Image: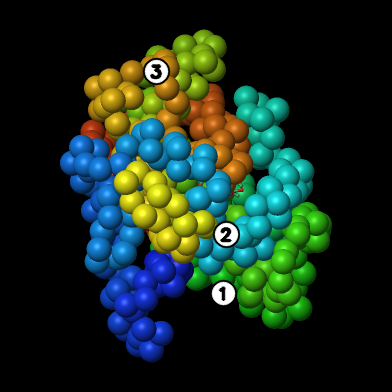
Amino acid sequence: MISKFKQLVWAAFDKSKPSVTATCSHIAQTSESDRLTEFLISGYHNKSSHLGEEDLVFFQEFNVHCAFKYHVVKEILNDKDVFGVSTVHLNLNSLYFSRDEALHMHNKKIALKHLTFLSKEFQSSENVRVTKMFDIFLNHTPKDQPFNLVDIIVKPLLFLNSMDEFGLFESFPEFNPESPDFSFDTTVQRIIGFYADMDNLTYMLENYLEGGGKLPIRVNNLISELKVDHEFDQKEVVKFVKSMIFATVESTGSYVTSLVYEVYSRFPEVLSSSDLPLDKLQQISNEVLRIHTPVPFIFRTVTNDAEKYGKHLKTGDMVVVYLGAANMDPSVFEKPAEFRLGRSEKHLSFGRGHLACIGESASFRMGLNVIQNIRKENRFFKILDSEPQFEFENSMLKILQLNVLLHDKS
Ligand code: HEM
């Protein structure tokens, strides 16, 4: 089944593409949106050839401009007059995002006010709930039998922690590992299902609300303070909740898995030293995020006609901004494929400017907490895949399979 994300991205492109008529059948749209996804992914895979091309490369077939070079990408992200919105964002979540910059900035502040787990203040501290869940998950994993760390630990851990942060255990107690209704196997399967098809989460939330269920107070309070420039219904509320959960878990899952893999393979001393070297972990994280950019491309829509990079840009034009290419630009990162700690220029993996990520500190904390838990355990993982594959899932680049064995340390 085609993912909702692809359809939403396609819908945003479709509007900027007059050659496609509104009478397209669903089938035609599906295959068009698959072709679009393939095209966007191939842009990422061919990044090194595009780095040598123009500052903004125009692809006629999809009527889309693409930016690959570090300085161009950074400039576009910071240029809110010309590249002010992302219609893909508006399609995904029209309560938080707005065409009106003042509303969007207000909503960003409100999200940061209510979602205190995003605060930088906590980024180096342990999250005891994560520690508890980590323990529960380890106790359910078979000893001396290989299992996929991503499906059995990373995804469920992040998903359940995020549900808890949003207060959703109130509404769905069966997901709470401390509830008597919790079943490890069922929960893991359901969470794998959410990642495989985000519509599964939509259905769960919609059914719950249609059956008279209430959203948690935390989410209601947040929504009540958002400034939204239109009347909205329950479906938009569901989109908001789903989009915030996925923002929290998808890219962080990619980062945490890559971090575990890189720490094991390049910096095993981090796992065994008596004190956890925080500065070093931060530097490792930066290289992990640069080389394995979880969100390799993002979108912008031109908000005002402009002459830029030798091109005439019209209002409504779509621009794909390749963060994953910019992070490998050799004119900024010498020998970009080399893992080097302490590079002077920072990666662009959290975006920049007015649409930049609000989850940088929270994701570092998750990475840190997972490494802390691995260090603390009197059992240890042996990673069985020496070169795991990075693959696209929901337009994010990740290791989907990292097979490990769990041994006793002694
Ligand atoms: C390693 C983990 C993460 C990565 C790589 C990442 C990446 C990104 C990127 C690239 C953007 C900018 C999109 C754009 O400019 O079009 C973004 C935006 C956003 N991210 Fe993250 N993200 C991560 C974790 C999180 C977490 C933990 C949250 C928790 C709420 C989060 C919430 C958001 C939100 C709400 C936005 C939209 C911000 C705005 O426009 O106001 N992200 N993220």
Q: Which comes before the other along the chain, label 1 or label 3?
A: 1
Q: Which residue is mark 2?
A: 243
Q: Which residue is at the front of the view, 193 or 5?
A: 5
Quarter assignment of residue 167: bottom right
Task: State whether label 2 is within 8 Å of ligand 1.
Answer: yes
Amino acid type assigned to the residue bearing label 3 in the image:
Arg
- 372 up-or-down from 176: above or below: above
Q: CA distance from mark 2 to mark 1?
A: 14 Å
The answer to whether residue 5 is above or below residue 356 is below
Q: Is any atom of residue 392 visible in this view? A: no
Mark drawn on residue 203: 1
Frontmost of labels 1 and 3 is: 3
Query: Toward which corner of the image does residue 270 lie, by quadrant?
Result: top left
- The kind of residue on which mark 2 rests is Ser
Q: Which mark is residue 348?
A: none
Q: For label 2, count other residues whose C-alpha is less than 10 Å away and answer few (under 14), some (14-19) or many (20+).
A: some
Is the CB atom of the residue marked by disc 3 within 8 angstroms of ligand 1's nearest atom? Answer: no
Dot 2 falls on a residue whose secondary structure is helix
Query: What residue is at 52 percent from the left and 57 percent from the top?
Result: 303
| Badge 1 element | helix
